[in-house]
Amino acid sequence: MDAVRILERPTNITWDYDEDADVLYLSIGEPRPAVGLDIGDGVVVRYDEAQGEVVGLTLLGLRARLLKSLAG
């Protein structure tokens, strides 16, 4: 398997939170087309196959997770 570049000192991380869906989108640099790889526990890694690098993360149910952790 080829190496996967994850983070090489990104200069710009952008984010967007969809309050209605309770989803946080994190992008390394400007958002761009990528393949979503569900790695479990509500985390989707966005991967640029052509460049061989991770370009973002999608976190599902973020508010619900935080509230559960804070209440625990």
Image: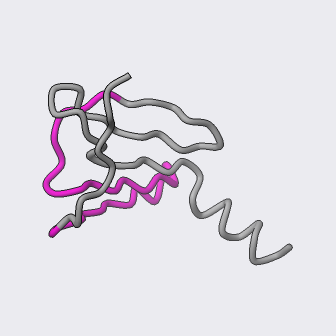
Report x, y in % for residue 64. Answer: 66, 60
Give the vertical position of 57 relative to 13 (above or below). above
Residue pictured at 67% horizontal, 61% vertical: 65
- Residue 11 is left or right of residue 8, and the answer is left
Seen as rendered, the residue at the extreme bottom is 70
Residue pictured at 38% horizontal, 31% vertical: 36
Give the vertical position of 45 relative to 71 (above or below). above
Report x, y in % for residue 56. Answer: 32, 48
Residue pictured at 23% horizontal, 66% vertical: 9
Seen as rendered, the residue at the extreme top is 1
Q: How many marks?
A: 0
Foreground: 41 or 4? Answer: 4
- Residue 12 is left or right of residue 72, and the answer is left
Span colored in magenta = 11-35
- Residue 55 is left or right of residue 58, and the answer is left
Report x, y in % for residue 43. Answer: 53, 44
Q: Quadrant of the N terminus?
A: top left
Foreground: 54 or 58? Answer: 54
- The picture quadrant where one finds residue 3 is top left
Q: Quadrant of the C terminus?
A: bottom right
Give the vertical position of 27 relative to 50 (above or below). below
Residue 22 included in the magenta stretch of the image: yes
- The picture quadrant where one finds residue 17 is bottom left
Foreground: 72 or 22? Answer: 72
Which of the colour schemes (rainbow, by chain, secondary structure, one colour) is used? one colour
Residue 12 included in the magenta stretch of the image: yes
- Residue 39 is left or right of residue 19, and the answer is right
Report x, y in % for residue 46. Answer: 34, 38
